[in-house]
Amino acid sequence: MTKQLVTYIMGGMRFIDELRALDDVGVDYVEVGIPFSDPVADGPTIMQAGQEAIQDQMTTQKIFDALKSVKDDVKTRIVLMTYYHSIETYGEAAFIQTAEEAGVYGLIIPDMPHEYIVQLKEKYPKRQIKLISLIAMTANQERRETIARQAEGFIYTVTMNEVTGQNGTFHPELKTHIQDIKKIAQVPVFAGFGIRTPAHVQSITEVADGVVVGSEIVKRFKQEGIAQTKAYVQSLCDVLN
């Protein structure tokens, strides 16, 4: 299977321009973050981007409307990353329906434990949108296996026990951890959190089916603009192809 690249952008004022840029490069998935006032799983770069989006009055509805406007033009799969409070405020059923109408492929809810994800899946059996599971390095083997067996879309395995984008080395048991999950999972297993360089990508995709790159892309779009960020993302794609 071809290795895949998942990228992350915040749903801010310019997110459609960023989405189009990533689509032009040919990334496989783009996660779009819905800004939230208390983002417990986000590092400082994404947290700041979320605060700026809130200040710019970006809302869940504005993000849905923008995605609807480009859904026929963009080839990459869109995954929304949002805290449960935003779904609850919008209304669960309405959120899922509107996301599907906007062409959204999947949904990641980082503050929702697996048991509640299972309940959500059972509550909406006819939905098309994938409810994507996170597996942390801290999860014990039994829990990893349970989540992996029930996963849909893809599995997002966390490469280190920190919030997104923080500096540091990858967990020494990372590759074994990913291999164990792949033995059970029926969907691709991607690794994310802290991946920044082509060397990181090359190392992790020796075992993972793909990588998730978030904070680095958010930072580069802000500091360097569209053209240079596209060149950076292309350098990651080149390692995968």
Image: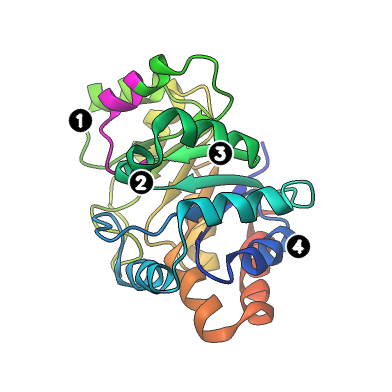
Of helix, strand and loop, which one carries label 3? helix
Amino acid at pointer 4: Asp
Q: Earlier in the sequence, mark 3 or mark 1?
A: 3
Residue named by callout 1: 140
- Location of residue 22 in the rendering, given as x and y in whole percent from the top left corner: 66, 62
Mark 3 crowd level (few <14, some 14–19, many ≥20, 10 Å Cα): many
Query: Does label 2 or label 1 sit earlier along the sequence?
Result: 2
Task: First in sequence, mark 4 or 2: give its number.
Answer: 4
Residue at image coords 36%, 46%: 86
Element type where label 4 sits in the image:
helix
Tell me how far mark 2 sits from mark 1, CA to CA.
Answer: 29 Å
x and y percent of residue 208 in the render? 49, 42
Looking at the rendering, the stretch of residues picked out in magenta corresponds to 109-119
Picture coordinates of residue 233, whole percent (x, y): 62, 67
For residue 99, the mark is 3
- Residue 127 picture quarter: top right
Q: Could you tell which of marks 3 and 2 lies nearer the N-terminus?
A: 2
Q: Are marks 2 and 1 in contact (CB under 8 Å)?
A: no
